[in-house]
Image (cartoon, grey):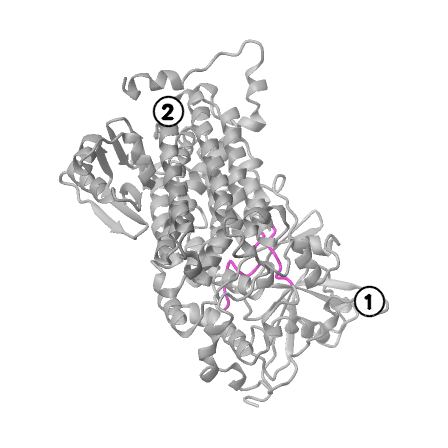
Amino acid sequence: MSKSVGPVLRMSDDVDGIVAAIVDDNPGQEVTVVDRGAYTRVSGDGELRVTRESIERHLGRDFAMRQLEGLMSSFAGRIEMTSEEVRWRLKRGNPVSSGPATSGRAEEPT
Amino acid sequence: MAREKWYDIARDLDWELSYVDYEAVFPEWMSGQGKVPREAWAEWDEPYKVTYPEYVATQREKETGAYSVKAVLQKSRLFDQLDEGWKSVAKEHFGAVALVEDLAVYAELRMARFGLSPAWRNMAIFGALDETRHTQISLYFPHGLLGKDPQYDWAHKAYQTNQWGIIAARAIFDGMMMNPNVVDVAIQLPFTFETGFTNVQFIALAADALESGDINFANMISSIQTDEARHSQQGGPTLEILVEHDPRRAQWIIDKTFWVSARLFSILTGPGMDYYTPLPMRKQSYKEFMQEWVAGQFLDQLRDYGLKKPWYWDEFMAGLDTWHHALHLGVWYWRPTVWWNPQGGVSPAERDWLHDKYPQWEEQFGPIWDVIIGNINDNRMDLTLPETLPWLCNLCHLPIGTAGSPHNEKFPVRSYPLTYNSHTYHFCSRPCRQIWWEDRDTLYDPTVIERLLGGEIQPPTVEGILTWMGLTPDVMGDDAYDYRWAKPYARTRRPQDRPGRPHGAPTPGMQPEQTAPPPGDSRPVPVNALFEHDFVTQLVVVLDTDTVEEAARKVAAQAVGRRIFPRDAGLVVRHAGTVVPGGITVAESGISALDIVTVGWAEQRREGS
């Protein structure tokens, strides 16, 4: 089962810096980067994080975490966002849903 | 002070009601609490946190970015150099999407009012502001192009019309945003639609847009999607609570929304990616983009919330190989009914690409395109244009047959009927029929076919239908490349070179009385007709006094020579599982209104003649 998580960044001069910050903040993690021009998909297995401090170091300027929103057009996994860092992760739950896939109000039509 | 130190207190600001009952403020039919205990909603916690000052600052930066790019490019000749096929992608997008963004404002506002926790209502306010921005930008950008091309007018006009694709979109989006309670809205719109599907239209398509040189469009749609990435996070916390207390309801809402969204995207996004975008500019195929964004990313998400794959998953995945090809063929054949110019997209090189990406394409759709190409090169354009309508699905409103394909044993071109309260409904697939059955009290939007047969469209001719749909001659779709993609075949592949087609012979059954008043005491019998190996079923009006043979020829007239190679062979009619003798009348045969009738070739009498 794939557990790819991470941001999808839209075209911007800052993409390379953000990717470098993600690589720095996830030592030992294999970070995959797929560049499709208008967007760049950054993926890790199960969990990725990035900190404001690393982004500032790579961009060479002040960066408020809220500014990541303007660069991130999507992400895989669940997000947690604070002023200092962003995490993307999956909880890896097991299916709890049971029974036939219907609203439960009626049998299948004939 | 860091946001984390005060955010939760501010966000959770709420009050206990004393002058009115809780149920009066959050009525079940609007709030949709269902089996979830009231106190459970206190756990609602948005994962993507933003404060109002942050929101305003970030949105200002986004708007400045999008509009300044537009301002600069407006002074260039970039737009004039865009490919006509690509422009159609943008035209279809604007007409189909701009006012859905407006509808989403109301969906967000409903959650902002009836959402069951203050945190949720707070986030929905941002969502409503986001969707207002999306409406404005999606109307403003095409407005600037009106002077160049009147088809851009449909960015604003489309939703005010009865154009068939818009009826389909309205039915789906009303069912997703306006009709349900807000718990269902949160699972349908932010979780399933915005997390699952809009990424394909707003991010994946941006990749093709940028390659095609439409920087403005790529910039606009990917800017919009940064808002979606945030406000779509209303879905997760709602789903988490619902899964805990009522997993069956959660699964059902996702399953039905996913299916209708997949059907809609196969016409909204599929043809643009695999036919309209110029070949060298295509980043990936529609199927590959769907596998990346929907089958991969969204399915992971679903599992993570403890839910299962929808019950029809294999059918959905198989549909990535066929649905949008069938819908592209339908849009192209019925091109006067759309507000953009579909690019045929089956030149020899494009066909090789299709074959490479979809190994069954040639077998399933190639023969139909060969007939069309032959007619284009013979200058028989009349045979490349419709004289009737495809029969439409009572749930997704898309043509019946387009949830399958010709030469496809597992998912053939056929109708899935259901008789309920003495009325026969027709569906494109078992899942559409199942969803309609479950939600039959809330989902009922008559199809164009039902409106036509009910007398709502006058006169009931192709011209009358186009007028009723709001299509004027200056915007009616035509081939984006003026048919030049078909020219290379003029020297090589000619349908009329095949055996059995007498050169210049009239197409069997071509009779102008399809919509004329019936003679004498005859009564019209509208049937849902399929000619074998065609890709859709169609409305064909026969007379109860016609012989079955005559009725068969009327069905053949709408397919043979148009999309099916003519053959020197008789016709066989099947109805209700049996072959009907050709000599009896329609009335005697038991064929009645809304019935399914299949016509095919009898055993070929003279091979090769």
Where residue B41 appears, as percent x and y from the top left, is 44, 22
Q: Is residue B574 above or below residue B263?
A: below
Chain letter for mark 1: B
Q: Residue at x 74, y 63 (%)?
A: B525
Give the quarter of the figure containing the N terminus of chain B. Answer: top left
Looking at the rendering, the stretch of residues picked out in magenta corresponds to B389-406
Where residue B483 appears, as percent x and y from the top left, is 50, 72
Question: For this rendering, which residue is in front, B77 or B100?
Answer: B77
Per the image, the residue denoted by label 2 is B53
Question: For this rendering, which residue is in front, B593 or B340?
Answer: B340
- Both labels 2 and 1 in a single chain: yes
Q: Residue at x 39, y 19 (%)?
A: B11
Residue B531 seen in the current view:
yes
Residue type at tag 1 = Ser
Residue type at tag 2 = Pro
Q: For the residue labelled by badge 2, is the local secondary structure a helix, a strand or a loop?
A: helix
Query: Dividing the picture into quarters, in which one does residue A25 lie?
Result: top left
Q: Is residue B393 magenta?
A: yes
- Give the Cα separation between the discs numbered 2 and 1: 72 Å
Q: Is residue B267 magenta?
A: no
Q: Residue at x 39, y 52 (%)?
A: B205
Residue B252 seen in the current view:
no
Sequence-first tag of 2 and 1: 2
Chain letter for mark 2: B
In the current view of this chain or complex, which residue is farthest to the front? B75
Please identify the dominant SS of the magenta region: loop
Q: Is residue B257 above or below residue B378?
A: above
